[in-house]
Image: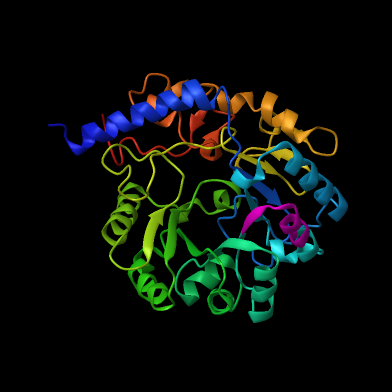
Amino acid sequence: MKTDRAIKCDHMTALAEYRDNVLRREPKLKFLFLELTDRCNERCRHCGSSCGDGADADLLTDDEIKAFLKKTASQFDIGNLQLCITGGEPLLRRGFFEIMDYARSLGYRWGMTTNGTLIDDDIAERLRRAGMATVSVSIDGLPETNDWFRRKEGGYDLALRGVRALARNGGFQHVQVTTVVHKKNLKELPALYEILSREGIRSWRVINMEPIGRANACKDLLLDGREMKAMLDFIRRNRFRGPMEVVYGCAHYLGPDYEREVRPWYFLCNAGIYTASVMCNGDIGACLDIERRPETIMGNIRRDDFAEVWKNRFAIFRTDYKRQGPCADCSHYRFCAGGASHSWDYDENRPLVCMKGILFRK
């Protein structure tokens, strides 16, 4: 009889073959991220996009976004597409509700990532009417830690107010809280679990702080190997302990012992095979957390047809470009393919985050 580890390796091998032989040849757009603004009312220490007091330079106009949404709806089966609204803080976008009402009228299913601080009962009701199905609200620790990490006094209370307003207004398919874990809030996870459970949250996404964007200025907050393992063990212990599921995010291959233990799928970087993004200036990319540089920007919707770009570009994400450096001869490469594209060092050609030697060895 095969062990759980052997069964997982069989599953991951099948997924790797599907990735190489199907998805890279015929990518399937499932998640379209739309960045409405680079402005934010918080200054989070981990922000991969370094958002804050952005001037919204070269911002797409409302009409440009609407034209893009209309054309995309005619080129893709949007019934099988999730439109993911993000920023910055998307609710700071002037014309937000006009844009999202239009998206709803075209038939898009959409969700949003937000810090929640601008959501009250009125905004929650307007979001419901605009067709928002899912939402993820960021709460990064207990009050003092959250407000320090996100650099906003009273941010915890405002975010919790937003969560409660969303729950009261109802009608949403999924209200999730996301927590970014670092050295100062790791020990707060048990207390935060109890708080969120009492609030009626049914999904809590727990992810580690990544060495990208603004986080590079405070690398002392990044989890070390022991702390990373402690976070994953916490998720595994509490994943189904109560009505609130605790789940790790999509980032990183975790090795045979942890894969499928902390999330309901095996690792697969979706960049360029399932996921594409349009940035607030119209640039087309894969995952929005990926470093923005010439080789990762595929075009711009102001001059390029998005469907053509999706079909014929994104080559960097549909090849084995990461099979080099420390990944070249790794026995786990077939499963992780070099790991998440957002944590790849495009100058040194190596992963910035690798769990080999931390969670697994051979």
Residue that appears at 35% across and 31% down = 12
* In this view, 148 is above or below 136: below
- The quadrant of the picture occupied by the N terminus is top left
Indicate the position of residue 290 as horizontal and vertical percent values.
Answer: 60, 40
Residues drawn in magenta: 100-111
Q: Is 350 contained in the magenta span?
A: no
Q: Residue at x 55, y 80 (%)?
A: 168
Rendered position, 321 above or below 270: above
Up the image or down, 125 lies above or below 297; here it is below
Q: Position of residue 64 (x, y in %)?
A: 85, 48
Q: How is the image coloured?
A: rainbow
Nearest the camera: 287 or 46? 287
Q: Quadrant of the C terminus?
A: top left
Q: Position of residue 198 (x, y in %)?
A: 39, 78
The image quadrant that residue 235 belongs to is bottom left
- Residue 103 belongs to magenta span: yes
Residue 326 visible in image = no
Q: Quadrant of residue 162?
A: bottom right
Is 333 situated left or right of 97 in this image? left
Q: Which of 114 and 143 is in front in this view?
A: 114
Quarter occupied by residue 342:
top right
**Residue under the point 53% across and 63% down:** 173
Q: Position of residue 8 (x, y in %)?
A: 28, 35
Would residue 119 appear left or right of 136 to someone viewing this image? right
Q: In this view, does 48 lie above or below 42?
A: above
Locate residue 210 relative to residue 44 in the image: left or right.
Answer: left
Report the front residue among 159 and 28: 28
